[in-house]
Amino acid sequence: MILDTNAISAIFAGDEGVASVIDGAVRHHLPAIVLGEYRYGLKRSRKRRNLELLLDRLEEQSIVLVIDGVTARHYADVREALRKQGRPIPENDVWIAALAIQHRQPIVSRDAHFDVVEGVKRISWAG
C-alpha cells in the first residue's frame, strides 16, 4: 500500500487508527513526491530532528516509488479524466494516483479526492 503524506503524519503522531490499517503490511510504498512533501513540511517543524530520523527509518524500510515514463503516461490519463469531469485535484496527488495505478497499490490517505480517480482505491482510517 502507498502511504500519502497525511498517513505518515498520522503514523508519527501515534494515531492508532492508521496503525490498524497498515498493520500486517510487510513493506509500504512511498512515492518520492510524498517524501518531498513531508521533508518540506519538516523545514518549519519544531520536532524536525526527531521526525527526520523517523522518516529516514520509514524510507529505509519501504519501497520508494519514483516517476518514470510509465508513470507519466498514467499521469496524463488521470489528469485528462479529471479535467473532463471538472474535478481537478492537487498536482502532486495526480502523480501519486498515477503511481498507485502503475503499481496497482491502494493509497492510505484521508484525502477523499482520490475517490474520483478511476482505478485508484483509497483506504482511510478513523481516529
Image (cartoon, rainbow, N blue to C red):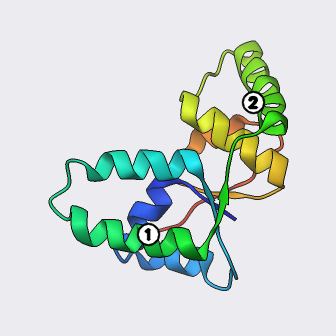
User: Residue 74: horizontal and vertical position, in percent?
Assistant: 81, 33
Residue at label 1?
56
Q: How dense is the environment of label 1, judged by Cα within 10 Å: few (below 14), some, or many (20 and up)?
A: few
User: Residue 56: horizontal and vertical position, in percent?
Assistant: 44, 69
Residue pictured at 65% horizontal, 33% vertical: 94
Which quarter of the image is occupied by the N terminus?
bottom right
Give the residue furthest to the left: 46
Q: Is residue 122 left or right of residue 5?
A: right
Which element type, helix, strand or loop, lies under badge 2? helix
46, 59: nearer the viewer:
59
The kind of residue tagged 1 is: Asp
User: Residue 36: horizontal and vertical position, in percent?
Assistant: 46, 46
The kind of residue tagged 2 is: Tyr
Residue at label 2?
75
Query: Looking at the image, do the residues carrying marks 1 and 2 touch, with CB atoms under 8 Å apart?
Result: no
State whether residue 127 appears in this view: no
> How far is disc 1 from disc 2 in space, using C-alphas?
27 Å
